[in-house]
Image (cartoon, grey):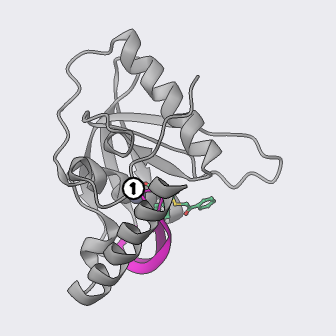
Amino acid sequence: MTIRPILIHPDPRLKKVADPVTEITDDLRRAADDMLETMYDAPGVGLAGPQIGLMKRILVMDCSKDPEGSRNPMVLMNPEITWASDELNTYEEGCLSIPEQYAEVTRPAQVEVRWLGLDGQLHEQRFDGLWATCVQHEIDHLNGKLFIDYLSPLKRQLITRRMIKLKREMARA
Ligand code: K1U
Ligand code: ZN
């Protein structure tokens, strides 16, 4: 498994709609393993294909808060939200592609998602709490949307300017 570099906003690949997965190849299985390792290393609770420049509809997540530290990694391909609750939840979100910037985003509190698993089977599950927030944040990535797109243009511009500066500093280092 390999830790892959995470793209930092602004990057045109983070604004594109990712392509559906049509075949579960060994390359895709390796990419899913790499995405999980990259997510755990960051550390983060989710990661979507476009964040490592993989323009496929694949995401990984693990929002388990097991005190014994046991992991619950999930790999979702071609995920679709089939139901969203009327109840809303506000969470202070972060993003591995927008380091050290956080803002409150309001989304449905529960969602049902259908996806293709690495086993080639269709799965459907209801998500709640941080899992629900995370899966919606990751599906947004597959559609070229970032959490800052929910903020006012002024806040978005401020964060984008910070990221341009950060990328300039990282390139110099
Ligand atoms: O997609 C990403 O950029 C990953 C992102 C997912 C996410 C976080 C918070 C709310 C919704 C979605 C992250 O994982 S940012 C890092 C983070 O929030 C975190 C890291 C370690 C433990 C708990 C949270
Ligand atoms: Zn993100």
Q: Residue at x 33, y 83 (%)?
A: 158
Quadrant position of the N terminus in the picture: top right
Q: Is residue 123 above or below residue 160?
A: above
Q: Is residue 37 above or below residue 155?
A: above
Question: How far across and down, in percent of the image, does residue 16 sit?
Answer: 17, 48
Element carrying mark 1 = loop
Q: Residue at x 19, y 31 (%)?
A: 20
Magenta stretch, main secondary structure class: strand
Left or right of 75? Residue 155 is left
Left or right of 111? Residue 96 is right
Question: How far across and down, in percent of the image, does residue 165 sit?
Answer: 41, 71
Q: Residue at x 56, y 33 (%)?
A: 3
Question: How far across and down, in percent of the image, does residue 123 sit?
Answer: 36, 32
Q: Which quadrant of the structure image shows residue 107?
A: bottom left
In magenta segment, residue 8: no
Residue that numbered label 1 is attached to: 8
- The residue closer to the viewer here, 29 or 74, is 29
- The residue closer to the viewer here, 140 or 38, is 38
Looking at the image, how many numbered discs can be counted on the residues? 1
Question: How far across and down, in percent of the image, does residue 125 sit?
Answer: 40, 44
Q: Residue at x 39, y 55 (%)?
A: 8
Task: Identify the magenta region.
Answer: 88-109
Q: Which residue type does callout 1 highlight?
A: Ile
Q: Is residue 21 above or below residue 55?
A: above
Left or right of 41? Residue 131 is left
In magenta segment, residue 100: yes
At label 1, counting other C-alpha atoms closer than 10 Å, the crowd grade (few under 14, some 14-19, many 20 or more) is some
